[in-house]
Image (cartoon, grey):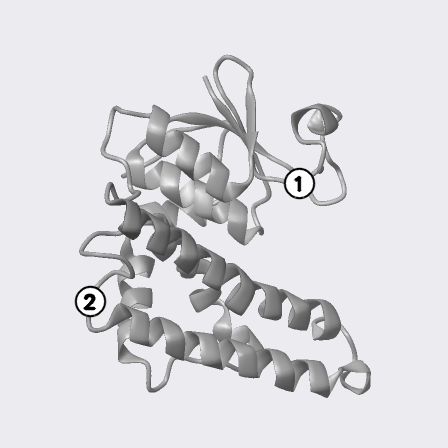
Amino acid sequence: MATLYHYMDCPYCFRVRAYLAERGIPYASNAVERGAPPPELPSLNPLGRLPIWVTDAGRPVFGSSTILTFLDATETASPGLLPLDPLARARCAMAEQMVEEGLLNPLMHIDREMVGREGQMWSLEVYRTETRRVRQMLHVFEQLLGGRQWLVGDALTPADLALAQPLTILERFGLDLQGLPGLAGLAERLNKRTSIVSARKKPETELTRAEG
């Protein structure tokens, strides 16, 4: 059986778990503790990063977007989540990049600079700059939705899964979705999906059966 090496608190690892749950793909879970990487990690990914998907033949695939593309092409027991139309597929990839660069990167920057530090040690300039970036990108996503339920087309795609975590943690950084009804509705739909709920739970056993 294939194995997923992942952190529980990583948004990229979360994205893969949500995808697996959405499609009902079984896998063995190897949840790695921060600061305690497994000895085999360098041989699986020379970059030393997670998530890593190891096929049942023992071949590693790393990087969340790469893993999802691979699984969409190779797992045929259930319908894939990537659009078949080349332009729609490209739009999905672009939306994922926007999530990473416009939401996750600034939020993680704020987290590194401010969370856990005394107030006098905060960089208010970092906070102002990065929250401004996030608000601008949230408005872009609101426009991208254009009244639809999902970011790309009429069905859920990996682009929507990528948004699930950053939309959930906005309040931690003094941000919200006020004035963004489309995004607020998307966040509510995502939070109610069984796959999202499942992806946020720590596996109770080493073997995880993804739930659709």
Q: Which residue extends farthest front?
A: 87
**Residue pictured at 27% horizontal, 39% vertical:** 212
Residue 97 pos. (x, y %): 48, 57
Q: Is residue 25 visible?
A: no
Viewed as shown, does residue 171 lie left or right of 36? left
- Viewer-closest of 206 and 135: 135
Amino acid type of the residue that numbered disc 2 sits on in the rendered structure: Arg
Q: Is residue 199 above or below residue 127?
A: above
The quadrant in which residue 138 appears is bottom left
**Residue pictured at 72% horizontal, 32% vertical:** 46
Residue 24 pos. (x, y %): 30, 32
Instruction: Give the mark count.
Output: 2
Q: Is residue 60 visible?
A: yes
Amino acid type of the residue that numbered disc 1 sits on in the rendered structure: Arg
Residue 182's label in the rendered image is: none
Residue 148's label in the rendered image is: 2
| Quadrant, the N terminus | top left
Residue 34 pos. (x, y %): 71, 45
Mark nearer the N terminus (1 vs 2): 1
